[in-house]
Amino acid sequence: MVLPQHSKASAPVLSHFDLTGKTAIVTGGCRGIGLEAARGLAEAGAKVAITYTSTDPAEADRIAALLSKDAGVPVKAYKCDVKSPDEVRAAVEQVTRDLGGGRLDICVANAGIAAHIPALEYGEGAWREMLDVNFHGAFWTAQAAARIFAEQAKRGGDGRASIIFTSSVSGILVNVPQQQAAYNASKAAVTHLAKSLAVEWVDFARVNCISPGFIATDMISAHPEERIKQWFDMIPGKRMCDAAELKGAYVFLASEASSYMTGT
């Protein structure tokens, strides 16, 4: 199988972004970038599952209900620890049954954590936790979705599934002054994983990667004010990006608007 053609490339351009009838899962979708990615997919017409680990279940359900009401599509929350391959596989399969009626179209491997620990002071537990969530968790998520995408293709599906990783600009450069070697390394691994899987899984899915810079989320606001001020001196735009400004990028990569883009 080759990379599928756009179903109707000559159609008006806004129709290329339409996700009506599609089913998506977004890990870490209750806050920050994941929440806005989920919102964008829902606003484009997709049925969306958001997963969470530490959020209170009642709050996760409230967030899902609000997204559903605003976008007019089903949105449901599922508890899932991305460090566990079994939990991830079970969640992805349940979402496919519950929301997709047996079909899944879009997977956003977004769940992640950050820590700022000098490399000389890193203990084994903290180091492994960073890689387990950011890198291993991203792979388990993509793998679980890819198994479903591959099976759908075998059954005669169109192969137009999309996997989107949330990486970071920290995967290609070293941000300062914070010391975060483990975070940077985990995101560099995610970026190259996306490129590698795009080649390996071209028969049944496109795989791409979004690597945000400084985004105004809880993860950023936890930094000291003096550090944030120092960042502004290095940001050409002289402001943080609102997380909602990223949702269009996720819709683009999830939709046929990017039908000839993979490994990017």
Image (tube, rainbow, N blue to C red):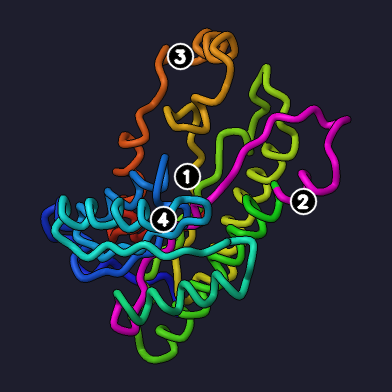
N-terminal-most mark, 4 or 2: 2
Residue type (three-letter) at the residue carrying disc 1: Ile
Q: Residue at x 31, y 64 (%)?
A: 76
Tell me, for residue 261, which label it has, or none: 4
Residue identified by numbered label 2: 128
Question: For the residue labelled by badge 2, is the local secondary structure a helix, a strand or a loop?
Answer: helix
Q: Nearer the viewer, mark 3 or mark 4?
A: 3
Q: Nearer the viewer, mark 1 or mark 4?
A: 1
How far is disc 2 from disc 3 in space, using C-alphas? Answer: 34 Å
Neighbours of disc 1 within 10 Å: few (<14), some (14-19), many (20+): some
On the picture, is 237 further left or further right than 257? Answer: right
Magenta region: 100-129
Residue type (three-letter) at the residue carrying disc 2: Arg
Residue identified by numbered label 3: 236
Residue furthest bottom as drawn? 155
Q: Nearer the viewer, residue 111 or 13?
A: 111
Percent position of residue 207, x then y: 48, 60
On the picture, is 126 further left or further right than 139? Answer: right
How far is disc 1 from disc 4 in space, using C-alphas? Answer: 13 Å
Residue type (three-letter) at the residue carrying disc 3: Pro
Q: Nearer the viewer, residue 65 or 70?
A: 65
